[in-house]
Image (tube, coloured by chain):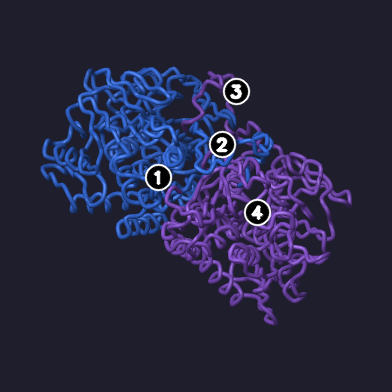
Chain colours: A blue, B purple
Amino acid sequence: MSEKNSNTKHIIILGGGFAGLWAAKEFGKKDGYQVTVIDRNNYHLFQPLLYQVASAGLEPEQISYPLRGTFRKMLNVEFRMAEVTGLDLEKKVLLSDVGPIHYDGLIIALGSVTSYFGVPGAEEFAFSLKNAEEAIDIRNHILSCFEYAQYEPDPAIREQLLTFTVVGGGPTGVEYAGALAELVHTSLRRDFRGLNKEDVKIKLIEGEDGPLNGYPDKLRYYAKNKLEKLGVHGCYKQHVVQVEADKVTLKSGETISTRTVLWTAGIRGNKVAEEMGLPLGRANRIITKPELNLAEHPEVFVAGDIALPMDEEKMLSGPTVAPNAIQQGVLAAKNLMSLFEGKKLTPFSYFDKGSLATIGRSSAVVHLGKLKITGFFAWVTWLIIHLLYLIGFRNRVIVFINWAFEYLLFERGVRLIMPKAKDTIPHGKADEYEPEGTEGKALNKRSVDKKEP
Amino acid sequence: MSEKNSNTKHIIILGGGFAGLWAAKEFGKKDGYQVTVIDRNNYHLFQPLLYQVASAGLEPEQISYPLRGTFRKMLNVEFRMAEVTGLDLEKKVLLSDVGPIHYDGLIIALGSVTSYFGVPGAEEFAFSLKNAEEAIDIRNHILSCFEYAQYEPDPAIREQLLTFTVVGGGPTGVEYAGALAELVHTSLRRDFRGLNKEDVKIKLIEGEDGPLNGYPDKLRYYAKNKLEKLGVHGCYKQHVVQVEADKVTLKSGETISTRTVLWTAGIRGNKVAEEMGLPLGRANRIITKPELNLAEHPEVFVAGDIALPMDEEKMLSGPTVAPNAIQQGVLAAKNLMSLFEGKKLTPFSYFDKGSLATIGRSSAVVHLGKLKITGFFAWVTWLIIHLLYLIGFRNRVIVFINWAFEYLLFERGVRLIMPKAKDTIPHGKADEYEPEGTEGKALNKRSVDKKEP
């Protein structure tokens, strides 16, 4: 930044998600600002399609775009891959694993993590679906469950391996349960010949009386029916009270034998924010003024899932979805510029662009203003909106091709256990051929090169 | 296998690479055989394009195809994901981590691993390029080197981070060095504005007097020139004598400061075979009769990189490339059937279909019989052959689209550090903004949730 003149303000944007990226784009058009975007990953991840990675429909690379690629044409925006380690609000210095960085203005857009509400065992045994690594883990785990179930002699373990539990009936839970049901009953049924439809159970656990709480009743009813038709067993008006390695216990006392629990029931602000000593509200989100900045430090703005803008007692944020994050990212950037330019700041108000969720093949629910549509047309709307918001032309083309294959062939392409980590699933020593005892020339398992087939 | 009648022979094929897959296809057409293919991965990997994964050109999922998908239509072939742990040749029992399995006939097609020839430090510090995990590791490592080099204040460390060393001038080494040079000088130059062409060094170390030893001189000369034009510095007639974390020492005494050493200089039989107590020859490959089976156990065949068929003192195997593996896999299957049917077995002889290697954009060398071609036409030949052998129509379409984008836009799409493991690169605390010491409110780095941005 040797070339920057003394009037140039240095802005740091923490996080390259929807809020951070759209904030950066605002600055990319303006003179007088030098912007550094910091993220621990070198890419923007399109989270709304993450559930398709976890259900073997898309490659994770296809919903990710290198942040440096996005900023190539914005000569005043640079990217740094770094992890945030602290914040000195008084000195205006951000601390990171690549050193301290001074800022004139800061936008915190660190996003959210999964909240387990303190349910015992949930953090340890349940899967979360918030980043690429977690989505890959879930895909690998589910495919491995099928691999091992096929030869598992113990029916109890086999049942655990083939029962998949989704906690939370919001859009993510509904979309994932639908995608998983389709994966199982199309591709995997053909892959695993010995598998009966009845062997596989998918459970959706939700506290309300049905899925998609907050959506109009017509759409909720449609989604509930559609999930049932796909073979998803809804456990409504239920809460999880404990998660263990091989089962889930509900408030009613009922237990579900399962090795797979996907937790989509709640989010909370990223933990990094907690340790920065910022004012936290509900779900550990950072409380801001209506203009999205901190009362004590007006040059610090917060946007996206981690922001909790409050007007007295009234929460101004929309739901924690991409449009809310984008709107807050844009406003935070504009207000930060207004601050430096001595102009009046604008309070945030969420503009509801509508909400939509897909429930498997050719069916979705879309709620846009007074419009409430379901079925094929809603599904096409869903597809188009997601393709448009996906970043990168190559990604759009390849995602479209994957969807076309999936639609035409009832097939999921990415049924790959890759990259392979340690086996997380204890499996029996199933055998159908054993001739006379197991006293073969056994090798020490440790000594076998684990990297090769 | 309860339905199999007593005449049905149970065949085990170890490994789902080229040799194993083509062997299985032979049995897929025949009655009287029940086949189990065993691999630790649930997919076939198209190794000839692995170097493009390691150079951010292709997603690993696109050169992989689920083995269960391949065997869907072969009702007598089943797949089991398992790791081999031992072999009882007398009892005809294979031991695996999912239990012992009896066989009537066995085809060992476990492939090869990288051989470091005992060079000190090579196994510890050099990268190998033999499976998907290793290719992803290399991609992540190289992109990380650029991320950290940009802000590295120490010029010596910066030089190490931006010097990339490829050991071995065979087709893999040549193709990777060419692809890496193009990645650096197209996509990454645009991503990293501060980077000068001279800052990045790519070294190719080869014991012979030039690349592609064994190819006709005309093609070797072309390849050598082409690599030079791409900015690859050839260190010919040189051997590596030591690899350390930050440097490579050559036989001449010269050292190269580098954090990246990719070892393509040699292969050896998979270590699992060593522990099975089978007769091993050069490079720990399993010595077989000319008909590809063991002298002592004629029902055990060996095919692919791991096989070393010997006719007295003469080695019958071709080079360790895909066509050799395919030919051996097919013959092993046919000979195994002949054995059971009391027919005469056929000795192996390698049919040389030619050899080819690409050296970056629009250029390749192709040697087919008397035909020796270079340049654009050779490159198109290379593209077509690789697309044809790639398994899965979806994969072919998506690889073709990726290549088209790369060709038209001089761009590599997969510049993603994903999935993110621990940082392997020690990096300095570079800082350009440091205001007055680093005494900010530092957090304990360990306590920050490493999973989130």
Decide if residue B214 is on the left or right side of residue A226.
Answer: right
- Residue A221 figure quarter: top left
Residue B363: give its label: none
Tell which subunit mark 3 falls on: B
Q: Earlier in the sequence, mark 2 or mark 3?
A: 2
Camera-nearest residue between A362 and A234: A234
Query: Alpha carbon of mark 1 to alpha carbon of mark 2: how far?
Result: 19 Å
Mark 2 against mark 4, which lies toward the viewer?
4
Q: Earlier in the sequence, mark 3 or mark 4?
A: 4
Q: Is residue A109 visible?
A: no
Identify the residue under disc 4: B111
Camera-nearest residue between A390 and B374: B374
Q: Earlier in the sequence, mark 2 or mark 4?
A: 4
Identify the residue under disc 2: B421
Looking at the rendered structure, whether the residues under marks 1 and 2 are on a common chain is answered as no
Camera-nearest residue between A68 and B326: B326
Query: Alpha carbon of mark 2 to alpha carbon of mark 4: how far?
Result: 27 Å
**Amino acid carrying mark 2 in the image:** Ala
Q: Position of residue B279 (x, y in %)?
A: 76, 51
Looking at the rendered structure, whether the residues under marks 1 and 3 are on a common chain is answered as no
